[in-house]
Image (cartoon, rainbow, N blue to C red):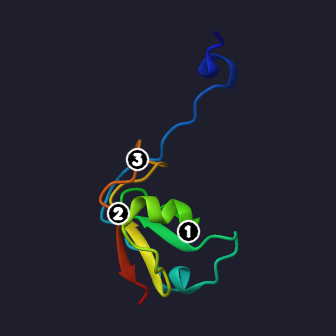
Amino acid sequence: MIDKVALLGKTKKLPKSGSLKPHPALLRAPLSQGGAIRYFCTGCGSCYELTAEGASELLSSSSFAHKYVLCDGCIMCGDKFENPHLVAVP
């Protein structure tokens, strides 16, 4: 069996400092990558778009208008989304 890490290498996770806050203009910007909702990680500051399917797996909601997902950790700084919850865009 081929060792993927030996073949392709491994990316480093972003440092997780915590207590980061998103800039309101970033949250109000139009979604540009075909996502249904944006997420922001307070751990590393990552902000990306999620598809409706991906967001529905994290949350027990399918209504994402004027909201974003706030989490304490994400796949960029850890192994999974930590404490994801919906927040109204300011």
Q: Residue furthest top?
A: 1
The C terminus - image quarter: bottom left
| Disc 1 element | helix
What's the mark number on residue 84? 2
Residue type of the residue flagged with mark 2: Pro
Tell me the crowding category of disc 3: few under 14, some 14 to 19, or many 20 or more residues within 10 angstroms, Cα based.
few
Residue type of the residue flagged with mark 1: Ala
What distance separates the C-alpha of mark 1 from that of mark 3? 18 Å
Between label 2 and label 1, give the one nearer the viewer. 1
Residue type of the residue flagged with mark 3: Lys
Which picture quadrant has residue 22? bottom left
Identity of the residue drawn at 38% across and 69% down: 70
What distance separates the C-alpha of mark 2 from that of mark 1? 15 Å
What's the mark number on residue 52? 1
Residue 45 in view of the camera: no
Q: Nearer the viewer, residue 67 or 20?
A: 67
Circles 3 and 2, Cβ within 8 Å, touching? The answer is: no
The N terminus - image quarter: top right
Q: Position of residue 73 (x, y in %)?
A: 36, 54
| Disc 2 element | loop
| Disc 3 element | loop
Q: Which residue is mark 3?
A: 80
Q: Earlier in the sequence, mark 1 or mark 3?
A: 1
What distance separates the C-alpha of mark 3 from that of mark 2? 10 Å
Circles 1 and 3, Cβ within 8 Å, touching? The answer is: no
